Image (tube, rainbow, N blue to C red):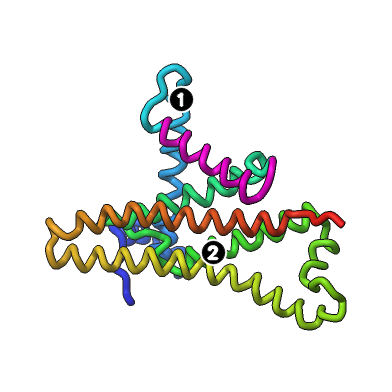
Amino acid sequence: MEHESSILYEPFNRYIWRGAFGYTVPDHVIMALLVLVVSCVLFPLATRRVSKDNPSGFQHFLELIVGGLKALLEDIVGHGASKRFLYIIGGFASFIFISNIFGLFFFLQPPTSNPNTTFALGACAFLYYNYQGVKTQGLWHYLKHFAGPMPLLAPLMIPIEIIGHLARILSLGMRLFGNIFGEHTATGIFMGILPFVLPWPMMGLGIFGAFLQTFVFVMLTMVYIGGATTVEEH
């Protein structure tokens, strides 16, 4: 299904990119860059007003989110995981949530409604947890898990494990893309039918969906990290 472009697509390609190398920059890439710009402006400004004596409402909100991510990491991955993995998990959460929220604005397009973005996020999570597994356990010990509990079963288990791990990219990417694309499309349709009535409940549902899909993505990433970095005792 063809998605209309954001308000920045034409100006960016005409006045900034100017057809360099004979290509135009896709809209989802422009929107992803906008997410980075918003993050680079929003979070430094928020941290400049951090106060222990008189915290703002936004500070309370950020502390609640960070505390929740730390607690999830400690519960799912293990003791000390919040110090090791908070930055990568927080980065995923921030990027995905802000991207999802873009769907509430008619002049923007959520980057996560494009499969290129969601599969790239899934691939990043896949590469990261495997890297952490090799780093924690060592290459040989980590690869031994793919062979299964018995050497006799290795020829069967290795292909199954490889397919199972690669399917995680598909799972992460398709779940996020399908939900955000469907919700954004439905909101656009309702906006055209009754522009001042139906969109409001859909926008409320959109905010809930933005939180939910962000939570599902980071939780699954935590589960994968936990499985890769757990060292079995013999």
Q: Is residue 147 above or below residue 76?
A: below
Dot 1: element: loop
Query: What's the residue type where badge 2 is placed?
Result: Ala
Q: Is residue 228 left or right of residue 60?
A: right
Q: Closer to the camera, 69 or 128?
A: 69
Q: Quadrant of residue 114?
A: bottom left
Quarter of the image that includes the N terminus: bottom left
The part of the image, by quadrant, that contains residue 157 is bottom right
Q: Residue at x 58, y 57 (%)?
A: 221
Give the structural element (helix, strand or loop) at label 2. helix
Residue at 41 percent of width and 60 percent of height: 111
Query: Label 1: which residue?
Result: 50
Magenta residues, start to end: 59-79
Q: Nearer the viewer, residue 123 or 200?
A: 200
Residue beneath disc 2 = 120
Is 18 in the magenta?
no
Q: Any magenta on residue 78?
A: yes
Q: CA distance from mark 2 to mark 1?
A: 33 Å
The x and y percentages for residue 161 are 71, 74
Q: Is residue 89 visible?
A: yes
Q: Amino acid at mark 1?
A: Val
At x 57%, y 41%, the residue is 71
